Image (cartoon, rainbow, N blue to C red):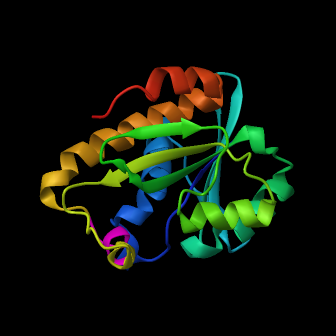
């Protein structure tokens, strides 16, 4: 089984924010695979689908972003999924809007959700797909970044964001049904 875990914040007020790109990508994967989410232990929702001989489970933790590691650890242990059979999908203000990057390991890069996962799993060997949100509208001051990531995309960004979600969706499916290296070779090349 391969898990695609999209990070975000639960609740209507966060639904279309930059920080919820992980949820948006997982929702797009679910739509493409015609998969329905069901409840899961009150702390996440998930859904499973067989695709090309691979079992894919999509997961959206329902904790807030900063506590994602608690839920991800519990989920992986419950389903006996190794880290090399999981992909965490997040937003990243260090990448330009429209860019995606798949990496099989690394630091949190300043992302609190990824930091929480690294902390609770005690490992940086966590495959991740980062979706860039940096744009000319991003504040220069670091103390304003929290408000920025919790804000919705503006009209001028929407088309690029939609294309990036589709690209991230396809990359996630390739990682799950083929392997990380194929997904990296095919999708890490260019910005939309």
Front residue of 147 and 2? 147
- At x 19%, y 52%, the residue is 157
Observer able to see residue 159: yes
- At x 82%, y 44%, the residue is 82
Front residue of 47 and 149? 149
- At x 20%, y 45%, the residue is 159
Residue 182's spot in the image, x, y percent? 58, 20
Q: Is residue 148 above or below residue 166?
A: below
Residue 12's spot in the image, x, y percent? 38, 76
Is residue 149 magenta-colored?
Answer: yes
Specify whether 54 is left or right of 37: right
- At x 31%, y 73%, the residue is 141
Q: Which residues are magenta?
A: 147-152
Q: Quadrant of residue 77?
A: bottom right
Specify whether 136 is left or right of 116: left
Q: Is residue 61 above or below residue 42?
A: above
The C terminus: image quadrant: top left
Q: Quadrant of residue 31?
A: top left
Q: Is residue 2 above or below residue 64?
A: above
The N terminus: image quadrant: top right
Front residue of 161 and 146? 146
**Among all residues in the image, which is located at the extreme front?**
141
């Amino acid at each position: 089984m391969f898990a695609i875990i999209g990070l975000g914040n639960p609740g209507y007020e966060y639904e279309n924010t930059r920080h919820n790109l992980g949820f948006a990508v997982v929702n797009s994967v679910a739509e493409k695979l015609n998969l329905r989410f069901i409840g899961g232990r009150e702390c996440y929702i998930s859904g499973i689908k067989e695709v090309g001989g691979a079992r894919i489970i999509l997961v959206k933790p329902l904790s807030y972003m900063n506590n994602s590691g608690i839920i991800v650890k519990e989920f992986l242990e419950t389903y006996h999924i190794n880290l090399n059979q999981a992909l965490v999908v997040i937003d990243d203000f260090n990448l330009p809007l429209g860019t995606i990057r798949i990496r099989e390991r690394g630091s949190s890069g300043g992302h609190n959700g990824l930091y929480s996962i690294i902390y609770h799993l005690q490992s940086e060997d966590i495959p991740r797909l980062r979706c860039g949100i940096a744009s000319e509208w991003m504040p220069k001051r670091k103390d304003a970044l929290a408000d920025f990531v919790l804000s919705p995309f503006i009209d001028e960004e929407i088309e690029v964001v939609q294309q990036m979600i589709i690209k991230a969706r396809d990359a996630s499916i390739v990682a799950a049904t083929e392997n990380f290296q194929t997904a990296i070779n095919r999708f890490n090349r260019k910005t939309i």
